[in-house]
Amino acid sequence: MATPRDSLDKKLVALLQMNARMPTSDLARKLGVARSTVHERIARLERTGVITGYTAVLSRPAQDNPVRALVMLAVEQQQVRQTLKRLETFPEIRTCLTVSGEFDICLVVEAPQLEDLDEALDDIAGIPGVQRSRSSIVLASKFDRSPVPTLAGG
């Protein structure tokens, strides 16, 4: 994965993560550099794969409060790559992490209704190579920083 080169890149990326539609002139003012510098930096960050796209982030109420589950998967070691490729095809999977310990993969899965979530979990558990799964339904989100992760701080 490409990374920002210096602190100016990191600050620029952090500002864009908070508001990808911020005008170049505002970015330049906040960073204390020329607009052309901001434009050139954004172009380079896109070209080198640091910035891979721009997206609209919906508020949770706009998503009609989906049902969410944390899913842990134990996978046959020789099947991990194939399993990850299959998992990419599930639109219900919001996050996929490889982890150490008793399980190999941790998923955040969302669906509009409990029945849809149940079906997705059955399909995930049926992927060849998945030895066992453990799911926990999310009751409430106390805070969620995921819509605007930042690279600030360095």
Image (cartoon, rainbow, N blue to C red):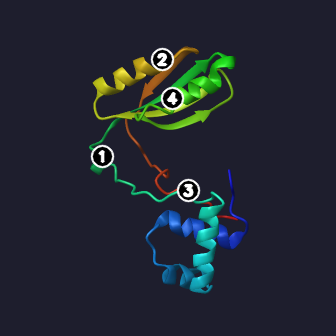
Residue hosting label 3: 52
* Most foreground residue, 39 or 21: 39
Residue 87 circle label: 4
**Can you give x and y, in whole percent of width and height, for residue 131 in the image?**
57, 12
Camera sees residue 96: yes
Sequence-first tag of 1 and 4: 1
Mark 4 and mark 3: Cα distance apart in space: 21 Å
Tell us which disc is closer to us: 1 or 4. 4
Mark 3 and mark 1: Cα distance apart in space: 24 Å
Label 4 element class:
helix
Residue hosting label 1: 63
Mark 2 and mark 4: Cα distance apart in space: 10 Å
As drawn, the residue found furthest toward the right would be 5
Tell us which disc is closer to us: 2 or 3. 3
**Can you give x and y, in whole percent of width and height, for residue 87 in the image?**
51, 29
Q: Amino acid at mark 2?
A: Ala
Position of 23 compared to 43: left or right? left
Label 3 element class:
loop
Q: Amino acid at mark 1?
A: Gln
10 Å neighbourhood of mark 1: few (<14), some, or many (≥20)? few
The residue under the point 59% across, 70% down is: 42
Label 1 element class:
helix
> Disc 2, disc 4: CB below 8 Å?
no
Mark 1 and mark 4: Cα distance apart in space: 22 Å
Sequence-first tag of 2 and 4: 4
Q: Amino acid at mark 3?
A: Thr
Sequence-first tag of 2 and 3: 3
Residue 125 circle label: 2
* Most foreground residue, 151 or 120: 120
Location of residue 102 by image quarter = top right
